Amino acid sequence: SAIQTVQAHIALQLMQLDQETEQWLSQFQLLLQTKASYIPIQDNIKMTLSILSDTFKVEESVQLMFMEQQTKIARLNTQLERARLLPDIVMGYNNQSFRGPASDQQYFTGANRFHSYKIGLGIPLVFGPLKARVAASKITEQIQRNNYQIAQQEIKAETETTWKLYERQLKAVSYYEAVALNDAQTITNAAWQQFEKGDINYTEWALMVNNAMLIQSYYVDAIKELNRLVIKLHYLTSK
């Protein structure tokens, strides 16, 4: 019957919710790296966005800042490889004492100090491998720059798209809160009043209540999608 179908559907939804809850709690426990079980407490199921679309700069995202550091490292490595092609200047200074007779029949007691200096120029004899390392480093540097530019465009496009989806979803949630939930409550109240007066039978009452519950379920789904977009925006715009 219709009532049994509704009951089975509700039972299935409850089972799915229990399974999802256990799954998310397990992931939360893994994230905390603990064997203890913690249940997050949230007074309001609807998350709020703490940033504004016109204040975010894509260059300030954590992902791009990390890639920018990788690009700088690649550039510094190229400079290092180039420096290996330059001659090495070698300078030295020596200060020592001598005790005993010398070749010119002088005798040194150790109080005398002898100073010496040296300077040299080291030139690489084989340039081929060094030039190859410079060329390879340049290629790596260019790849890092290209990856940065591609990621910058992708993050900017993804952020703009997510903003639009968020604004649209926020309007949908606002509609449920302003209109649809009130309609659901009205339907529920009418179902009870008509059932108590005998104007409708139990099957009709169940169908009306089920319609009201469907509206509430759609509202929960809308909140879930809104929260997902908020989390994604926080991730994309985190500094």
Image (cartoon, helix red, strand yellow):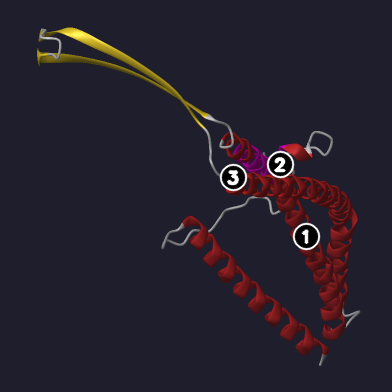
Q: Position of residue 14 (x, y in %)?
A: 66, 76
Specify the segment rendered in magenta: 60-77
> In the picture provided, is 118 more to the left or to the right than 126?
left
Task: Say which residue label 2 marks.
Answer: 61
SS for callout 1: helix
Identify whether 212 is placed above or below 96. below
63 in magenta: yes
Q: Residues within 10 Å of mark 2 (few under 14, many from 20)?
A: some
Quarter of the image that includes the C terminus: top right
The mark closer to the camera, 2 or 3, is 3
What amino acid is found at the position of numbered circle 2 in the picture?
Ser
Q: Which label's residue is closer to the chain start, 1 or 3?
A: 3
Task: Say which residue label 3 marks.
Answer: 130
The mark closer to the camera, 2 or 1, is 2
What amino acid is found at the position of numbered circle 1 in the picture?
Glu
> In the picture provided, is 79 more to the left or to the right than 46?
left
Task: Say which residue label 1 marks.
Answer: 225
Q: Nearer the viewer, residue 214 or 97?
A: 97
Quarter of the image that includes the N terminus: bottom right
Quote the CA–CA distance across marks 2 and 1. 23 Å
SS for callout 3: helix
Q: Quadrant of residue 102?
A: top left
Q: Which label's residue is closer to the chain start, 2 or 1?
A: 2
> In the picture provided, is 23 more to the left or to the right than 224?
left
Can you name the residue that lies furthest to the front here? 104
Q: Residue at x 78, y 60 (%)?
A: 225
Q: Position of residue 35 (x, y in %)?
A: 41, 63
Q: Residue at x 59, y 49 (%)?
A: 129
